[in-house]
Image (cartoon, rainbow, N blue to C red):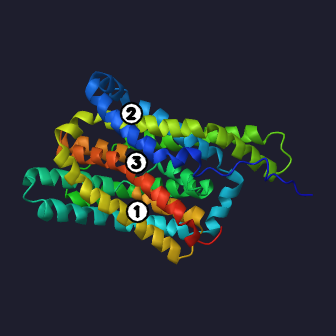
């Protein structure tokens, strides 16, 4: 006997009334961050001080609020089936570790040593290039879950993709950065890496698993459990969107004075970052399309490489070059560029989902 849950089950998390206006709200949040950061800089300085191992704890809580709803959607019983679809993991690994760090370095050299050579002092150009390399070698951990949720990505597969990325990062980040930067004494900030994984994956995953277990109590079938999870996800979606918007306000508020003091430098650093972001996305997206991956795997697969693990990049830039260095500034610009870019790519992916076969 089958149970019809179509009438009672909300649509999966994706583009709905919240996300239709999200780009407008994010634009307003950016402006609010710039305005407040200049009007009340002391407030943002105090908030920025709440950090440990270069991880801002206020932002961490907000990202946790964004990640948690998707973690509720992770079905541990289905995780063992991920191995039957290895193509998505292959695309993720190849793009993130064999393509992305080297194309970012190449674009940095092209723009800062040639295209912008007359606009930037050589010493500054070298610093900006270093910051870009650090970003290119650090694929995202936390925000990928947000972007995946907005494209209705498979939460189980996304979790595995991110986890595999993190394992590779432990072994590959330092050698790749050391090779591209030409440094021999690179020290990976393990506390930043481990704390970020714990805050952004382990804790919300455990909370999501406990929530799903609670929601599943009293249900008589997998369909009923999925319906209960979908209803709960729809209820907490406003908190997730709120977390994203407040995060944007804080990120731009933290750097408001720098952005307004050095607008040309910010713009110049953003150019190769934008080219890299869109280029990496489309490389992975079209590879996934050519390999006929389902959209629920293809979209997160492309978005993981596009987004960056900015806490790690910023921490290494500060430890190697100093807090006020051009390298640290470049990693911060990566943070500022990321949210608008990722929202545009999420919108593009949702409009082109018909390019991919059904799951």
Q: Residues within 10 Å of mark 3 (few under 14, many from 20)?
A: many
Q: How far apart are marks 2 and 1 (CA)?
A: 25 Å
Foreground mark, 2 or 3, reads 3
The reply to whether callout 2 and callout 1 are in contact (CB within 8 Å) is no
The C terminus: image quadrant: bottom right
Determine whether the residue tagged by mark 2 lies in a helix, strand or loop. Answer: strand
Q: How crowded is mark 2: few (under 14 residues within 10 Å), some or many (20 or more)?
A: some
Q: Which residue ends up furthest to the right in the rendered image?
A: 1
Q: Distance between the residues labelled 1 and 3?
A: 19 Å
Q: How crowded is mark 1: few (under 14 residues within 10 Å), some or many (20 or more)?
A: many
Q: Earlier in the sequence, mark 2 or mark 3?
A: 2
Q: Is residue 83 left or right of residue 277?
A: right
Residue 70: x, y in percent? 60, 46
Look at mark 3 in the image and give the residue it sits on: 339
Q: Nearer the viewer, residue 26 or 226?
A: 26
Residue 333: x, y in percent? 28, 47
Look at mark 2 in the image and give the residue it sits on: 56
Q: Is residue 195 left or right of residue 130?
A: right
Residue 96: x, y in percent? 40, 62
Residue 94: x, y in percent? 43, 68
Q: Which residue is drawn at 22% across and 51% down?
A: 267
Look at mark 1 in the image and give the residue it sits on: 96
Residue 71, numbered circle: none
Is 214 placed above or below 224 here? above
Foreground mark, 1 or 3, reads 3
The N terminus: image quadrant: bottom right
Task: Determine if residue 188 is in view.
Answer: no
């Amino acid at each position: 006997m089958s149970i019809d849950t179509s009438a009672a089950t909300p649509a999966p998390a994706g583009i709905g009334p919240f996300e239709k206006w999200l780009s407008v709200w994010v634009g307003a949040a950016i402006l609010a961050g710039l305005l407040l950061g200049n009007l009340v800089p002391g407030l943002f300085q105090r908030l920025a001080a709440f950090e440990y191992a270069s991880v801002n704890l206020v932002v961490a809580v907000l990202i946790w609020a964004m990640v948690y709803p998707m973690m509720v959607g992770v079905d541990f019983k289905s995780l063992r089936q991920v191995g039957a679809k290895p193509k998505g993991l292959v695309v993720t690994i190849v793009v993130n570790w064999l393509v992305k760090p080297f194309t970012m370095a190449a674009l940095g050299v092209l723009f800062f040593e040639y295209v912008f050579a007359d606009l930037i002092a050589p010493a500054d150009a070298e610093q900006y290039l270093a910051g870009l390399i650090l970003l290119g070698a650090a694929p995202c951990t936390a925000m990928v879950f947000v972007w995946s949720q907005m494209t209705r990505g498979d939460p189980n597969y996304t979790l595995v993709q991110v986890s595999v990325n993190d394992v590779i990062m432990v072994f590959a980040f330092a050698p790749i950065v050391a090779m591209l930067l030409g440094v021999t004494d690179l020290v990976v900030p393990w506390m930043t890496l481990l704390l970020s994984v714990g805050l952004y994956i382990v804790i919300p995953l455990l909370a999501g698993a406990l929530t799903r277990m609670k929601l599943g109590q009293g249900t008589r079938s997998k369909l009923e459990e999925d319906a209960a999870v979908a209803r709960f996800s729809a209820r907490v979606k406003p908190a997730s969107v709120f977390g994203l918007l407040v995060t944007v306000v804080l990120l731009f508020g933290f750097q408001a004075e720098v952005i307004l003091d050095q607008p040309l430098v910010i713009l110049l650093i953003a150019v190769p970052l934008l080219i890299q972001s869109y280029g990496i996305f489309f490389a992975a997206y079209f590879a996934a399309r050519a390999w006929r991956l389902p959209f629920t795997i293809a979209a997160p697969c492309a978005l993981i490489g596009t987004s960056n693990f900015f806490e790690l990049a910023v921490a290494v830039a500060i430890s190697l070059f100093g807090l006020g260095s051009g390298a640290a500034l470049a990693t911060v610009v990566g943070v500022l560029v990321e949210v608008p870019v990722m929202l545009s790519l999420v919108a593009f992916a949702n409009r082109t989902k018909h390019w991919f076969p059904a799951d």
